[in-house]
Amino acid sequence: MNKSLSVLNNHPQIWRARNQKQSETKFSLGFPRLDKALNGGVASTGLVRIASLTGVGELSLFKRVICQHRTHKLVVFINPPGLLQSPWLENLGLKAQQVLVVKAGTEQESLWAAEQCLKSTACHCVVLWSNAVNQKEARRLQVAATHNDALCLLYTPPQQQASSLNYSKTSSQADTPSQSDSSLPITLDIALLGKPHALSVNIRKQRHGWPKDNVVISHQWTPDNHAIKWAMAHNTLSDQALHSVS
């Protein structure tokens, strides 16, 4: 019994508050309350899952992370839910020559593309939209990102969380890897809920930190004409087409 407890106590996946690392590089999101809840911000490497509806400010929330000034590195968007426009990206802080858009035909192809981009060492950040990631796939992305000084932002639909609250699964269902499984080996797992002029952030899991619910930050996500005005004023900077592969 003592030997079993010793093996369990030394397992690398068990985190203790007293072992919190202070040297981990973090990217600030620019929202003091959220940065504090995240112990300084988002880790510079690893896999971050964001469960969110589309269009509530889920990308602009991470613009500081996505637009870190690494001019020799790419930002790759895989299967975005809409067409990415050069003026919008420039407004965000990205130049067209730094961006690659990948359109994959299947979930497996998109996951494979994300892993290859992370392993290439050419990417600073890979932004992936996917509906289904199991533990094995999450681990592969996590390892590829952490070993190659990159960050992967994984956007998933919010309804994927619901199954994690279903404790009456049948035995066959319990054996099926669930995307909403909180034991996924990832750096950060959060859920976003849009509110008028604000976002509510639920931190479901974070490396070297505790979960926190309902971290409300002021965030103007309601669409307005600011982006259109900016594009019209800076249209001379938007003559480059985005690089896209299918």
Image: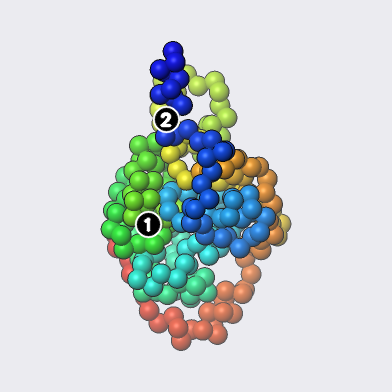
Screen quadrant of the C terminus: bottom left
User: How far is mark 1 from mark 2, CA to CA?
Assistant: 24 Å
Q: What colouring method underlies this structural image? A: rainbow
> Does 114 sit above or below residue 96?
above
Q: Position of residue 110 (x, y in %)?
A: 34, 50
Q: Is residue 174 above or below residue 136?
A: above
The structure residue drawn at horizontal position 37% and vertical position 41%, both measured from the top left corner, is 139
Q: Which mark is residue 9?
A: none
Quarter in which the N terminus is drawn: top left
Q: Is residue 222 left or right of residue 146?
A: right
Dot 2 surroundings within 10 Å: few (below 14), some, or many (20 or more)?
few
Q: Nearer the viewer, residue 205 or 230?
A: 205
Residue 161 seen in render: no
Q: Nearer the viewer, mark 1 or mark 2?
A: 2
Q: How many marks?
A: 2
Is 205 displayed left or right of 153 in the figure?
A: right
Q: Give the image location of residue 168, x and y in percent.
A: 54, 20
Q: Is residue 139 visible?
A: yes
Dot 1 surroundings within 10 Å: few (below 14), some, or many (20 or more)?
A: some
Mark 2 belongs to which amino acid? His
Image quarter for residue 41? bottom right
Q: Residue at x 64, y 42 (%)?
A: 212
Looking at the image, which residue is at 57% across and 30% down?
Answer: 165
The reply to whether callout 1 and callout 2 are in contact (CB within 8 Å) is no
Which element is circle 2 on? loop
- Amino acid beneath label 1: Asp
- Give the residue pinned by disc 1: 149
Q: Which mark is residue 11?
A: 2
143 versus 163 height, above or below: below
Q: Is residue 170 left or right of residue 119?
A: right
The location of residue 92, given as percent across then percent down, is 52, 70
N-terminal label among 1 and 2: 2
